[in-house]
Image (cartoon, grey):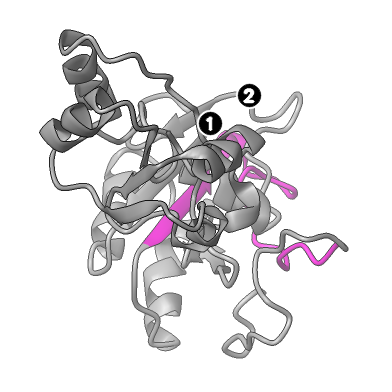
Amino acid sequence: MGVGPGHPGLATVQAVEAIKQADVIRNIDGCGVGLLHLAAAGADIGPLDSVEEIVRVARMGRKVAVLFPGNPYAFSNGSAIAERLQRAGIDFEAVPGLILELAAPVMSGIPLTIEGRSASIGLGLVKGAETVVLRLASGWWESGISALLADGRTPETPAALILNPGQPGQHRVGAPLGELARKAATYGLRGDALLGEAHPDHAGAPSGCSVQPAARRPGRLRGRDPDDRDPPDAHR
């Protein structure tokens, strides 16, 4: 089951109930740690070792929850595990979750589509999308920016890097695409990030990736904690 992008508040009610009812909980890549306190007192919790373990435990009649970051059937190997369970004759339910590419921009106040201006989203290097969102590992920011420029985006295209995406303390740095890497380097920023930008033909303000201050509206979910501090002008 998917537990969302990392912020505990973005897990679905269905995922939370599955964790509460599980006898055995296994997670992928350490995901869902902010939800494990919801598990039953006697639950067996640990990292996923193998699918064969899941098959063996399920055949013992125990309820098993396998936690995936985001959605188990998107950018993950949940479908391969589901296929193995199906071959073994194990009944299971796939629980969807919110993926990072859709959640993190909203948490930072970045609209992905705007009626009449930007109507398509590309997750990755997708040709023809009006708004593109890339997931970039630490050290690959410049490569992602270069790939978008080589794909025909102009250096003036509004863009943003979202640091610590999907987590309670995420924040963003915005600049024209051609200046974004330099601006991030100026602040000494590192780590995994999302790179978002809007097609030049749809890059007016507001745009799919406009660089306005992160949303500060009241509510439980925020793009960052109020005590976090930005580098000077990081949101300008």
Element carrying mark 1? loop
Q: Position of residue 144 (x, y in %)?
A: 29, 53
Under mark 1, the amino acid is Glu
Task: Tell which of 84 and 227 is nearer to you.
Answer: 84
> Counting residues from the N terminus, which is met first, the one under dot 2 or under dot 1?
2
Report the quarter where the N terminus lies.
Answer: top left
210 magenta-colored? yes
Task: Tell which of 202 and 119 is nearer to you.
Answer: 119
Task: Tell which of 154 and 29 is nearer to you.
Answer: 29
In the rendering, which numbered label is found on residue 119? 2
Q: Position of residue 101 (x, y in %)?
A: 48, 43
- The outermost residue toward the right is 218
Query: Which residue is at 58% across, 43% downward?
Result: 16
Vertical order, 105 against 202 (above or below): below
Q: Position of residue 131 (x, y in %)?
A: 53, 36
Q: Which segment is the magenta one? A: 193-217
Element carrying mark 2? loop
Vertical order, 116 against 175 (above or below): above
Left or right, 113 with respect to 50, comes to: right
Left or right, 78 with respect to 108, comes to: left
Q: Main secondary structure of the magenta part?
A: loop
Circle 1 is placed at which residue position? 130
| Residue 199 in view in this figure | no
Task: Answer whether labels 2 and 1 touch (C-beta < 8 Å).
Answer: yes
